[in-house]
Image: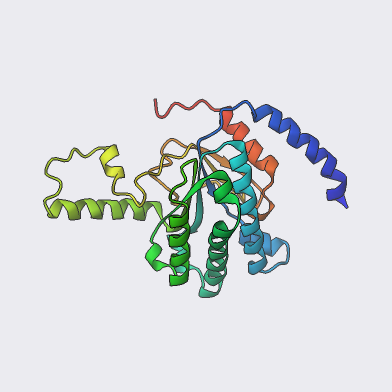
């Protein structure tokens, strides 16, 4: 009842926010940490399965909002290495089920084709079930010719682990005598990351009220603007996204200067 009464107010407020942000600047690369599914389940007397189902639906919605806004690149923290290794097998199976469902949907629905989205995946993908790895490979191949936008899925991903893996690759090449003439700087070190083409993130949005980055793309977040939203991920609204964009636009980005 209350939601129906507030709906006209919400629509007016959404339009007011849009008028504030529509002239830009719009971040090129947005990172999303979709947190709070389990707490949403507990507070709504719902199952984890229902929580992740709603979270999966919400991500599909938010990706379209970002594309329509003009954001070119999106990276989603779908599953951390810690969660991949430490969550119960029961809960992990639920999470992986909806990750696979979302990736399979990318192949059959309009999103990547309408917005020309190149899909990529980063992380310790070898830890994933074979059927999920196959789905990832299919959508990467299917979208490889698109270059308007990108969607990067961080699955079984940890920022520290990526840096360690990059150092291990570099040392391996050094031992093989392949680095005799290399000048080691930020540009050359990036070549050893899971995805050497992944650009730095302009804006990171984390839901659920937690104010931390949780080992997400540590290198790429060096100069990112951070926005922490109180809403749990399944309840994230367009006005929450607009607020994040407005916050980004009001900040002066000095990049350490």
Front-most of residues 69 and 142: 142
Front-most of residues 64 and 204: 64
Front-most of residues 135 and 12: 135
Quarter residue 128 falls in: bottom left
187 relative to 153 in the view: left or right = left
The structure residue drawn at horizontal position 62% and vertical position 25%, both measured from the top left corner, is 23
Farthest bottom residue?
90
Give residue 130's position: percent from left, percent from top: 43, 71
Q: Is residue 251 above or below residue 76?
A: above
16 relative to 174 in the view: left or right = right
Which quadrant does the C terminus fall into?
A: top left
Give residue 249's position: percent from left, percent from top: 58, 29
Q: Is residue 244 above or below residue 103?
A: above
56 relative to 178 in the view: left or right = right
The structure residue drawn at horizontal position 18% and vertical position 52%, both measured from the top left corner, is 173
Give residue 62's position: percent from left, percent from top: 62, 48
Quarter residue 164 falls in: bottom left
Give residue 215's position: percent from left, percent from top: 43, 51
């Amino acid at each position: 009842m209350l939601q129906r009464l507030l709906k006209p107010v919400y629509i007016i407020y959404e339009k007011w926010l849009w008028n504030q942000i529509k002239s830009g600047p719009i971040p090129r690369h947005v990172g999303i940490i979709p947190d709070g599914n389990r707490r949403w389940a507990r507070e709504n007397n719902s199952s984890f399965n229902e929580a992740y189902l709603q979270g999966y639906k919400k991500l599909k919605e938010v990706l379209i909002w970002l594309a329509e806004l003009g954001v070119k690149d999106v990276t989603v923290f779908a599953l951390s290495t810690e969660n991949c290794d430490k969550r119960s097998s029961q809960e992990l199976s639920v999470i992986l089920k909806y990750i696979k469902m979302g990736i399979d949907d990318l192949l059959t629905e309009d999103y990547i084709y309408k917005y020309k989205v190149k899909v990529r995946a980063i992380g310790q993908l070898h830890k994933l079930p074979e059927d999920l790895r196959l789905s990832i490979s299919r959508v990467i191949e299917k979208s490889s010719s698109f270059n308007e936008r990108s969607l990067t899925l961080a699955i079984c991903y940890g920022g520290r682990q990526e840096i360690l893996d990059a150092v291990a690759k570099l040392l391996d090449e050094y031992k093989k005598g392949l680095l005799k003439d290399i000048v080691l700087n930020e540009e050359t070190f990036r070549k050893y990351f899971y995805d050497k083409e992944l650009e730095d993130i302009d804006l990171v949005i984390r839901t659920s009220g937690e104010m931390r980055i949780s080992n997400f793309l540590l290198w790429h977040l060096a100069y990112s603007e951070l926005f922490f939203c109180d809403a749990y991920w399944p309840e994230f609204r367009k006005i929450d996204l607009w607020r994040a964009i407005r916050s980004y636009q009001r900040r002066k980005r000095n990049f350490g200067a």
